Every structure is written in structure tokens, then in C-alpha cells.
Image: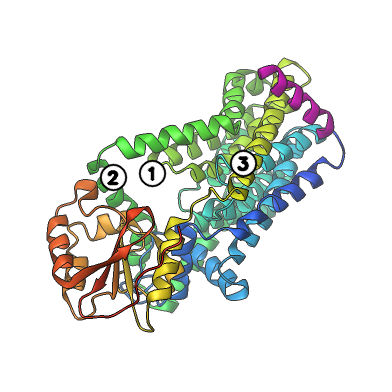
């Protein structure tokens, strides 16, 4: 089996040195993301879309009736694509972002290594972005941020080479803009900062030039920050509310995750590590770290900056706590740099890296074929969306829905509004810790017409679950079962058709 994979990798490798490789890799990165247009939106995509549609900023809430712990920029992107092309248009934009990421990664590799390394790096990035073992369907902040992150790295390298304050300013601007897509994506800032400091310490920059470039970069970083402040002031949102939504919430949520037990996060972390290994990401980064001393001797400045982005993005992923597989997309810029620095060599470490990239491409192809076959045989399940569709068919105008446990994809497919602000489980557990708000809603005049218990009432061991369950039993009656045997409740005294769920 290993011999066959190595043979396939060599076959791939023989074609990677074509001058059309970068263009082909970028094209494939676009085309292989398009099958996602046939699949329902995933929970985060659906949640961002719902928040964007109901966006109504007020002094004590960035988004109005619904809450999400994301920067307004990424929600604005979802709002724009939804308005222009409907809910699935975000996946077209994601495919375009993958094209730009491949091209930018090749440009970075061309700057730090060679044209040959650029071709191999383009293949590595395209393979990672289309590997279904990570995620080749959903589009979230990580995917949308990649062109900004890789663009900031290329601009930082250009600024160092040309001593250009303009390039440094743009590098800071793009690196900070990436934080608007996902607030933990600090890799562009880390790369640029370490690059400048290492260049000064090694004498590649004198003090005056270092200060000029650093000031320009900080100025670039300040632009998105000031733009966010200006938007908040114009929209009438308190700045402390913006800060809490984007960053402060994560501190509270981390405490909740710590109190909920480590079994689920540990299982997801193991799955994430397997995905990183199967896609080749761990081997690429690991190969660089093994040879980091040799790379340091060849170019200490770029090597130091690459170590900086690996450490920064690795820590950001580890500290996130949830360990979903698509978090790996945040490591793509670091992986691209590691691949470029090693693939340029004609020695053993260069040949090994090229084999690893070839195997990564084979892995992406095999996983994609498996995914396509699984879907063609109709084994892929969309239980949340199917349950929402069944509720939509039985609902009447003006009906509302709450999903306990937070499944925004079910909420979206139902077409019903929600009177509860939390579309995700973590905000619900963090901001409505004892379920007091939900219980008050269920007992009050604005109680939702429909209620789906997508997770058991006692999940996560949260206090107040039994009281909430009692309130639901008092006001609701079981009105059928959704997919995966999830109970669906209807407010007592209302008459609706029986659910016809096609799972």
C-alpha cells in the first residue's frame, strides 16, 4: 500500500513541475469547492446568515435580537453574499477565496524560495483546501481570511526586500483585516512582527529603516481597528459591547468549556489531529521543525518569522478549546511557508517534502472520491435540515421555533423566526447558564410555537435543566419526532398537521 502511494506521489510530482501548475492548482481549488453548492448550509454558515438577516445594532447588542461571538466584518460578508446571491452564495465566495489563497501562497513561495517551490506550494495549499477530511464544503471565517493572511505575508516580505513603508502599511492592513474574519487568526501579525524584529537583530535592517517600516505596519493595523470603532459609534453600539462580543465572550466561554468535562473536546482534538495527519499538514510542518536549524543557517530572518507564525497559529488553535476540524485552515499560511522553504532544496529534505506534498494531493483526491461516492449513494445524512424542512411544511405564518442545543441549520431550513437569542450551544450555555432566559420565554406570552430538543435536557450537566424541562412539559405537547429521534414539541392548544419527516 505504501509503495503504491509513493508511486502515485511520484506520478503527481512529475506533473507538478509544469509551468501551468499554479494556474491548474488554483482552478482545481475553485472547482473542487463547488460541489458544496449542492449541500445544505452547515450550522455556523446558517447561524451567520440568520444573524445577518436580522442584524439590528443597538447600544447593548452588536447584532440586535441574536448573538454571535464574531466581528461585524464577517457577518457583513454573509449579509452581502446572501443579499446578492442567496444563502449559498457564500460558498461561491469561499471558492474564490481558495483561488486567491493558492495564488498568494505561490507568490509567497516564489519570494522566499523559487519558482519550483511556488508550484509545489500551490499544490500543497490546493490539496489542503479541498480535502474532505478537513472540510471541502463549509465556508467560514478561516477560509475567507486566507487571502488576507497570505497577502499580508507576501507584502511583509516585499516591504523587507524593498524597505517599502507602503508595503509594510498594506501588510499590517491585511493582517488586521483577517482578524475581522476570525478573531484568533493572528498569524499575519505574528509573521510580520517577527520578520521585522529578526531583520533588525541580524543587521538586515538599520534602526531607522526598522522604525519606519514598523510604524507603517502599525498604521496599517490601526485602520481596521479604527473602522470598527467608527462603525460602532455610527451604529450606536457601545464599544465595550463590541469588545465583549468579539473577545470578552471567549474568556467566559472557555470557563464554561472547562466546567463541562474534557471527553468531547478530547475526542474532537483526536479527530482534528488525525485530519491534520491524513491531509499531510502535520508532516509538512513537522518536516520544517525537524530541519529548522538548517533553514536557520540558510535564512535566519524568514525562518524565525515562519517559526513565529507556526507557534502563533498553533497556540491559537490549542487555546480555542473546541477543536473543530475546519480550525486547521488557520494553519494553511504556516504550512505554505514550511512547504516552500523545504521544497526548494534538491537535497534529501527537499525530495522528502515533495513526496509529502504529492501524498497530500493523493489524499485529497482519494478523500474527495470517497465523499462523492458516499453522497452519490445517498448515504450522506442531513438530519438537521430535513427536520427543519418537515417543520416548515407543518408550520403556519407567524410560527416561531427554538432549537434547544443550538442547530442553526435546522432553524434556517424551517424558515421560522426565533424569539431566543442563541443559535449555538456555547453562547446558550455561557450567557444563559441556568437556562433562566429560555425558561422565562417558554413560560411567557412570546413562547415559541415549536421547540425541538436536539440535545437531551440534561446535556453538559448545566444547572436549571430540570426546571426548564418541567416548564416545557407544562406548556408543550409532543408533536412528533424529527430525524435521529429528536423530540419535536408544539405549544398546547395549537393545531398543526403531523410532521412528515424524510430522513
Verify CB contact (< 8 Å) between mark 1 and mark 2.
yes
Q: Position of residue 311 (x, y in %)?
A: 49, 34
Numbered disc 1: secondary structure: loop
**Residue that badge 1 annotates:** 322
Say if residue 25 shows up in the picture. Answer: yes
Residue in the foreground of this view, choosing between 299 and 280: 280
Q: Position of residue 35 (x, y in %)?
A: 65, 54
Numbered disc 2: secondary structure: helix
Q: Residue at x 55, y 54 (%)?
A: 138
* Magenta residues, start to end: 1-16
Q: Is residue 372 above or below residue 465?
A: above
Label placed on residue 131:
3
- Residue 305: quarter of image: top right
Q: Residue at x 32, y 78 (%)?
A: 496
- Residue 3: quarter of image: top right
Verify CB contact (< 8 Å) between mark 3 and mark 1.
no
Q: Position of residue 254 (x, y in %)?
A: 30, 46
Mark 3 and mark 1: span between their CA atoms?
A: 21 Å
Amino acid at each position: 500500500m505504501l509503495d503504491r502511494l509513493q508511486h502515485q506521489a511520484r506520478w503527481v510530482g512529475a506533473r507538478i513541475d509544469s509551468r501551468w501548475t499554479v494556474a491548474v492548482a488554483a482552478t482545481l481549488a475553485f472547482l473542487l469547492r463547488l460541489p458544496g453548492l449542492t449541500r445544505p448550509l452547515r450550522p455556523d454558515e446558517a447561524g451567520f446568515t440568520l444573524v445577518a438577516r436580522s442584524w439590528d445594532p443597538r447600544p447593548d447588542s452588536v447584532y440586535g435580537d441574536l448573538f454571535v461571538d464574531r466581528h461585524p466584518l464577517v457577518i457583513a460578508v454573509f449579509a452581502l453574499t446572501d443579499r446578492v446571491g442567496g444563502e449559498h452564495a457564500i460558498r461561491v465566495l469561499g471558492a474564490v477565496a481558495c483561488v486567491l489563497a493558492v495564488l498568494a501562497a505561490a507568490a509567497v513561495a516564489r519570494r522566499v524560495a523559487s519558482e519550483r517551490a511556488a508550484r509545489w506550494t500551490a499544490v500543497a495549499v490546493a490539496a489542503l483546501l479541498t480535502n474532505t477530511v478537513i472540510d471541502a464544503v463549509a465556508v467560514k471565517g478561516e477560509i475567507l481570511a486566507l487571502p488576507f493572511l497570505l497577502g499580508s505575508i507576501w507584502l511583509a516580505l516585499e516591504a523587507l526586500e524593498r524597505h517599502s513603508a507602503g508595503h509594510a502599511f498594506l501588510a499590517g492592513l491585511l493582517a488586521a483585516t483577517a482578524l475581522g474574519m476570525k478573531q484568533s487568526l493572528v498569524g499575519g501579525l505574528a509573521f510580520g512582527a517577527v520578520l521585522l524584529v529578526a531583520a533588525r537583530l541580524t543587521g538586515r535592517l538599520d534602526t531607522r529603516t526598522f522604525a519606519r517600516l514598523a510604524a507603517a505596519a502599525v498604521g496599517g493595523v490601526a485602520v481596521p481597528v479604527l473602522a470598527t470603532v467608527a462603525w460602532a459609534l455610527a451604529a450606536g453600539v457601545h464599544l465595550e459591547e463590541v469588545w465583549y462580543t468579539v473577545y470578552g465572550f471567549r474568556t467566559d466561554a472557555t470557563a464554561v468549556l472547562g466546567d463541562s468535562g474534557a471527553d468531547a473536546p478530547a475526542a474532537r482534538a483526536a479527530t482534528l489531529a488525525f485530519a491534520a495527519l491524513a491531509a499531510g499538514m502535520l508532516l509538512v510542518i513537522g518536516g520544517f521543525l525537524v530541519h529548522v536549524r538548517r533553514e536557520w543557517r540558510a535564512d535566519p530572518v524568514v525562518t524565525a518569522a515562519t517559526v513565529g507564525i507556526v507557534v502563533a497559529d498553533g497556540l491559537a488553535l490549542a487555546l480555542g478549546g473546541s477543536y473543530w476540524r475546519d480550525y486547521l485552515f488557520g494553519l494553511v499560511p504556516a504550512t505554505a511557508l514550511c512547504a516552500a522553504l523545504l521544497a526548494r532544496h534538491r537535497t534529501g529534505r527537499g525530495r522528502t517534502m515533495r513526496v509529502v506534498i504529492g501524498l497530500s494531493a493523493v489524499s485529497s483526491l482519494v478523500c474527495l472520491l470517497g465523499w462523492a461516492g458516499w453522497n452519490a449513494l445517498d448515504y450522506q445524512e442531513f438530519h438537521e435540515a430535513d427536520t427543519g424542512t418537515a417543520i416548515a411544511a407543518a408550520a403556519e405564518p407567524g410560527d416561531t421555533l427554538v432549537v434547544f442545543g443550538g442547530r442553526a441549520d435546522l432553524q434556517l431550513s424551517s424558515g421560522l423566526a426565533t424569539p431566543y437569542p442563541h443559535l449555538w450551544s456555547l453562547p446558550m450555555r455561557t450567557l444563559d447558564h441556568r437556562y433562566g432566559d429560555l425558561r422565562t420565554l417558554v413560560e411567557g406570552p412570546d413562547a415559541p410555537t415549536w421547540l425541538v430538543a436536539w440535545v437531551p435536557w440534561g446535556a453538559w450537566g448545566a444547572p436549571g435543566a430540570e426546571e426548564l424541562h418541567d416548564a416545557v412539559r407544562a406548556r408543550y405537547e409532543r408533536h412528533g419526532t424529527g430525524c435521529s429521534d429528536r423530540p419535536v414539541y408544539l405549544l398546547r392548544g395549537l393545531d398543526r398537521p403531523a410532521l412528515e419527516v424524510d430522513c
